């Protein structure tokens, strides 16, 4: 009986090991890069490549972070502004915070913000160089922070 168990166990281990090798080899083949990159799909202008995201700290302040890249000029810093409003349409902007996304720091901004209206849901967006029309794909991304949540919510 013991020999039967050991032989079944050996068969199981040898077949499962073989199937794992087959699966990993096929997944490596599937992840290979294309032979020629598609140059027509290159990005242009400003784009949010990570974020925007906000996390509430224990003292009630928020850490706002984002990564905005200008694909037409990767050598210079990006000047932006965080607009904070009480409504989604940004008719009532209550604060504007200037932000510089530095090329040396991979165009990542981390701003600590303490809300002036601590018991309200606030909406924020990033605007490049203070002009919403200069980068509509960036300024159209609206996020909210609320005293009832620990993370920001996309709108």
Image (spheres, grey):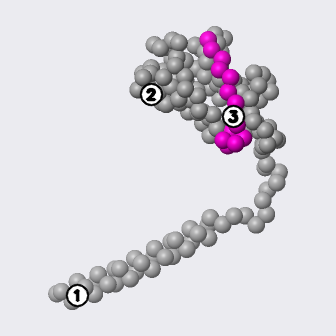
Report the mark closest to the observer, 2 or 1: 2
148 to the left or right of 86:
left
Q: Which mark is residue 4?
A: 1
Could you say which is closer to the camera, residue 100 or residue 125? Answer: 100
- Tell me whether circle 2 and circle 1 mark residues in contact (CB < 8 Å): no
Nearer to the camera, 110 or 130: 110
| Residue 116 percent across, percent down from the top left | 53, 12
87 sits left or right of 140 in the view: left
Task: Determine which quarter of the picture holds residue 59.
Answer: top left
Q: Going by the image, does 58 lie left or right of 128?
A: left
Give the number of the disc on residue 57.
Answer: 2
- Identify the element where label 3 is drawn: strand
Do we see residue 46 in this rendering? yes
Q: Is residue 104 magenta?
A: yes
Q: Is residue 7 above or below residue 59?
A: below
Q: Which numbered circle lies on residue 101? A: 3
Q: Position of residue 154 (x, y in %)?
A: 56, 29
């Amino acid at each position: 009986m013991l020999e039967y168990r050991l032989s079944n166990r050996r068969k199981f281990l040898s077949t499962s090991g073989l199937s794992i090798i087959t699966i990993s080899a096929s997944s490596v083949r599937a992840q290979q890069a294309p032979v020629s990159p598609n140059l027509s799909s290159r990005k242009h202008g400003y784009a949010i490549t990570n974020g925007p995201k906000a996390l509430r700290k224990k003292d009630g302040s928020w850490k706002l972070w984002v990564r905005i890249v200008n694909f037409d000029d990767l050598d210079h810093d990006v000047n932006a502004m965080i607009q904070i409003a009480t409504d989604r349409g940004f008719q009532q902007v209550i604060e504007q915070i200037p932000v510089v996304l530095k090329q040396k720091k991979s165009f990542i901004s981390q701003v600590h913000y303490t809300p002036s209206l601590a018991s309200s849901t606030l909406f924020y967006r990033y605007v490049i160089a203070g002009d919403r029309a200069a980068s509509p794909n960036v300024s159209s991304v609206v996020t909210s922070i609320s005293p009832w949540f620990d993370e920001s919510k996309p709108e």
